[in-house]
Amino acid sequence: MSAYTAVLLYAVWTLLLPIGYASIRVPLIAGHKKRADHWERGQPIDDPAFLVRARNAHSNCAENFPVFAAVVIVAGLLGKIAIADAVAAYVFYARIAQGLSHLAGTTLPFVALRGCFYFIQVALILTMIWRLVLG
């Protein structure tokens, strides 16, 4: 998988997560069971735990995507895309694994897995940066 493909798939994953919780919220709004502003920040959360985890997994993806995409774009601009190609797919795989462990639950094993997969992503992105700067 190329680095550019990994970035695109990461973007797709980031978009799929909110579709999951929106697919539950939209019918509630359409059926007049909840107001559209029911989920605004600062409101009490009464969503099922899975939806809260999906929202948090989406937020985490959105927070980290710009760094990953920027490193891949810079690699391309520097003419060193091969460095990103060697690593970017693993960043994407670790992101999927982190998201799935986030969705699976909040028990200690899932939280530990989520942390491990996040650390893997950070280490891989730092590896790309290191190789771009020194390579």
Image (cartoon, helix red, strand yellow):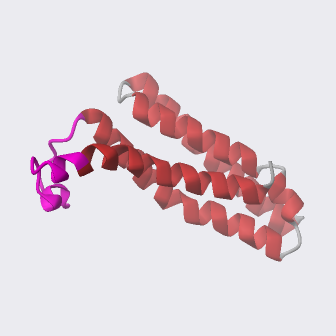
Q: Is residue 45 magenta?
A: yes
Q: Is residue 4 magenta?
A: no
Q: Write the start and end of the magenta stretch as one range.
A: 27-48
Picture coordinates of residue 113, whole percent (x, y) = 51, 30
> Looking at the image, which residue sits at the far bottom?
77
Check the picture and name the quadrant holding the C terminus: bottom right
Determine which quarter of the picture holds residue 95. top right
Picture coordinates of residue 30, whole percent (x, y) = 18, 52
Picture coordinates of residue 19, whole percent (x, y) = 40, 49
Determine which quarter of the picture holds residue 50. top left
Determine the residue positioned at 48% across, 32% down.
101
Determine the residue positioned at 33% across, 46% down.
23
Picture coordinates of residue 46, whole percent (x, y) = 14, 42
Q: Main secondary structure of the magenta part?
A: loop
- As drawn, is 27 to the left or to the right of 72? left
- As drawn, is 50 to the left or to the right of 64? left
> Looking at the image, which residue sits at the far front?
31
Q: Nearer the viewer, residue 81 or 129?
A: 81
**Position above or below: 132 against 120:** below
- As drawn, is 32 to the left or to the right of 23? left
Q: How many marks?
A: 0
Determine the residue positioned at 45% across, 52% down.
60
Determine the residue positioned at 39% across, 25% down.
108
Confirm whether residue 42 shows in the render.
no
- As drawn, is 32 to the left or to the right of 118? left
Confirm whether residue 125 shows in the render.
yes
